[in-house]
Image: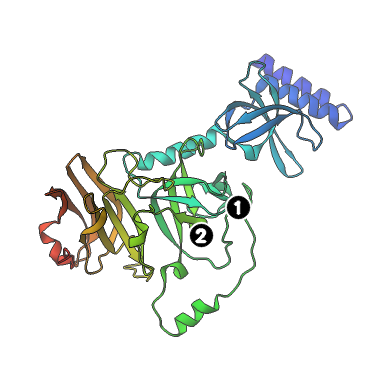
Amino acid sequence: MKLKVIFFVTILLFVFGQTGCGLLDQTVSSVSGVFGIGDTATVITKKAQIRTSYAVVAADLLEVKLGDKLDVLDQMDFEKVLWYRVRAHDEANTEGWIEAQNVITGKTLEKSIALSEEFRTLSPQASGQLRAASNLRLASDMNPENALFKLTAGSTFEIMTWKFVVKQQDVSDVDDAKKGEQKQVKKSRNEEIEAAKEANEPEKIEDKYDIWYLVRLDKSVSPAPAGWLFGRQVELQVPSDIIFFQHNNKKFVTWQRFDTDTANKVNSGDKVTAPGDWVILSRTNISKPINGDEPDFDGILVLAFDKYRQEYYTAWRTTGEVWGKLPLKLEGTGDSKSFTILIRRPEGEMEEKRFVITRDKLRVKITPPEDIAAFDIKPPK
């Protein structure tokens, strides 16, 4: 160890005694090859190039693809752009430079994996897609330090939960700033919101809050399994066979299919499938906080599909509003299933309620908890 330190110091003294930046860069790169940074990197774009240099004029050495592993040997900020010197795992062990935005380092990837452990035992609550490129983050805020990397427009994901954050009018609709930077926008006064306040109209949820989504990503989309997305460019992918039952003043926020035992309960990516049976949670657009906390949903709907009539029917629904929180949990296999939700009791405490799902002459039947009448929830006539 002492010999390595003496060797390193000797090289530095030699470098500082020379003139010319070229020799300095060459020597530092050689030293990095000896000592290394000791990290790995994973490619996060569909394709990227390892190049001979980080300069504007450089030759391509090797094309790497999404998920490829690289060894990080060095890093360099060149004209405000971060580059990594890497070694590929091809037959030639190609070494060269790759722009940092094309990879995620092993240490950062570990943070995303740790975040995914928070919902390891939970089922997804919904599915979504990005309208525009947006940063995947470690936390639900715009702090430049928690940006992982940028997901491309059209990326799909499963939504595990979400959080309401008081809306900032001076924040851009698109979270596409580079890692380590924060997007600057001009402050503006929303006249419609201010007019509504003066008229004492009920506050709308979208005017009062921004929604941040904690999402799970498929390996085909990203090596990082989890992160937070700014909700202004997230579009919920309600399955096409049930979106017809969504009303403008009561949007679907959570849905899970219960006529199948497959892992995909929310039809991530809105894949076209045969009609089925669904538990759906919905929410009106009116803000209704209790002690500063908003409900995740205020309505419950169970849709079932009649295979003989080839049509949907309402198996059960709420007639009044409830005050509920995620998660929606679907349990059981085959014809023995149930779902549980958290509902606020009139006294104020949250209580988990279990609804049993059975079939009576091929028709779906929902048996709610015995005391559910206390919450003004009734089956349809």
Question: Residue 243 placed where, x, y %?
Answer: 37, 58
Amino acid type at image mark 1 = Asp
Mark 2 falls on what kind of element? helix
Residue nearest the viewer, comparing 49 with 26: 49
Residue at 85 percent across and 29 percent down: it is: 22
Q: Is residue 206 above or below residue 183?
A: below
The residue tagged 2 is 232
Residue 41 location, quadrant: top right
Q: Answer with left or right where residue 26 lies relative to residue 203.
A: right
Residue nearest the viewer, comparing 242 with 214: 242
The residue tagged 1 is 176
Q: Answer with left or right where residue 282 lies relative to residue 226.
A: left
Task: Report how far apart the C-alphas of labels 2 and 1 lie in the structure.
Answer: 12 Å
Question: Badge 1 local density, few (<14 within 10 Å), some, or many (20+)?
Answer: many
Amino acid type at image mark 2 = Arg
Q: Answer with left or right where residue 305 lies relative to residue 214.
A: left
Mark 1 falls on what kind of element? loop
Q: Earlier in the sequence, mark 2 or mark 1?
A: 1
Residue nearest the viewer, comparing 14 with 340: 340
